[in-house]
Image (cartoon, rainbow, N blue to C red):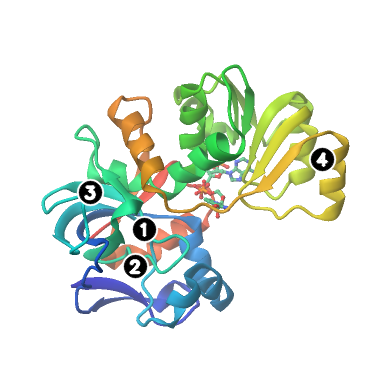
Amino acid sequence: MKAIILTEPGGVDKLKVAEIPAPVPGDHEVLIQNKAISINPVDTFVRSRQQYVDYVLGEGAKEKPIILGWDVSGVVVDTGKAVTRFKKGDEVFGMVKFKGHGKAYAEYTTAPEDHLALKPANTTHEEAAAATLTALTAWQALVTYARIQKGDKVLIHAAAGGVGHYAVQIAKHFGAFVIGTGSPKNKEFVLGLGADQFIDYTTERFEVVVTDADIVLDSLDEPGRSLAALKKGGRLISILTQFDDALLEQARAKDVYTYRMSVYSDGEQMKAIAGLLAGGELRSHVSETYTFDQIAAAHQSVESGRTRGKIILKP
Ligand SMILES: NC(=O)c1ccc[n+]([C@@H]2O[C@H](COP(=O)([O-])OP(=O)(O)OC[C@H]3O[C@@H](n4cnc5c(N)ncnc54)[C@H](OP(=O)(O)O)[C@@H]3O)[C@@H](O)[C@H]2O)c1
């Protein structure tokens, strides 16, 4: 099969298309013929530094070749002998083995059955591959950790990005008042996702505009400003910054719950996301699609930090 292998950590030139044997599923795994794969900022971190290879792949870093990627949508073509949830021919999607060695940048990927859900019929493989790592991150941040409630005021940074555009829609699904930040070019896009208010970060400081949020989903390196945007007793969920002692002390003084999360694979949550996609309450916005031969350009685009929605890779 064709796969994109990482020859060594470094620049985009370290990603090479290679012909390697297709993987064989373990007892609890299925073999997926990938129809679409999505790319995340973490792919570019792992590509560029050995410390991220070790941190994200863990024991899997010893396996060679290293194949980046965790987000897939495709067709089940083989099943391990203990698999009960899926059969050959099923169309599935999910974030596979995160953290771990996901090996999604390939024509075929093996996946534990409990990392997957059936792809809704109204959702393309591109849209489904998109709604995996970033949709799970938005779900876990808002539902698992922030325990979002109807009527909550929720501030979502980078609302036009991969995580942000799902977070806006998920927060609206739960009946929140949603405020999204972005640059002016994304104003109509973010409001079109259902956000009630847009903050243009190029002209306004979000912590001046908002001082009474119940929840901030923080994907920026600005925890102090995010804390200032929260009301007493609010919830600050960070997907980027580790909080330092001074920040934690300030949060305690304000009775704010803080959590620095790391997304994890979860088939039950994938089912919830599939349900929202099927019901039309969640839509993926795919802004760019690349082939394996264009992987360098795809990574450069993600590294710009300015992409809208999701970036897709097609085998
Ligand atoms: N801890 C975890 O489990 C976890 C999980 C997923 C992601 N992450 C991290 O979370 C971050 C976001 O991930 P992502 O996939 O959503 O990234 P992304 O799709 O690459 O985000 C791009 C978006 O960020 C916006 N943006 C850039 N600077 C901004 C600013 N100062 N204020 C508001 N918006 C800004 C851009 O909008 P404009 O063009 O309008 O500026 C763009 O639409 C990344 O650092 C990623 O590594 C962590």
Residue 35 in the image, given as x and y percentages of width and height = 21, 54
- Element assignment for label 4: helix
State if disc 4 and disc 3 touch (CB < 8 Å).
no
Sequence-first disc among 1 and 4: 1
Do the numbered discs 2 and 4 sit on residues whose CB atoms are within 8 Å? Answer: no
- Residue at numbered disc 1: 96
Question: For this view, does 233 lie left or right of residue 30?
Answer: right
Write down the quadrant of residue 29 in the picture: bottom left
User: Pointer 4: what residue?
Assistant: 251
Residue visible at 56% across and 35% down? 142
Location of residue 82 in the rendering, given as x and y in whole percent from the top left corner: 22, 61
Q: Residue at x 34, y 67 (%)?
A: 103
Residue at the spot x=23%, y=73% of the render? 23
Quadrant that contains the C terminus: bottom left
Which comes before the other along the chain, label 1 or label 3?
A: 3
| Residues at marks 2 and 1 touching, judged by CB atoms closer than 8 Å | yes
The numbered mark at residue 205 is none
Q: Amino acid at mark 4?
A: Ala
Residue 221 in picture, x, y percent from top left: 70, 50
Residue at label 2?
103
Decide if ligand 1 comes within 8 Å of the CB at mark 2.
no
Nearest to the eye among marks 2 and 4: give it: 4
Disc 2 versus disc 1: nearer the observer: 1
Report the residue marked by disc 3.
Answer: 85
Kind of residue sitting beneath label 1: Val
The reply to whether dot 1 and dot 3 touch (C-beta < 8 Å) is no
Mark 4 Cα-neighbour bin, 10 Å: few <14, some 14–19, many ≥20: many
10 Å crowding of disc 1: few (<14), some (14-19), many (20+): many
Please report contact status of discs 3 and 2: CB closer than 8 Å, yes or no.
no
Q: Nearer the viewer, residue 102 or 218?
A: 102
Q: Is residue 245 visible?
A: yes
Q: Does the closest atom of ligand 1 sit within 8 Å of the Cβ of label 1? A: no
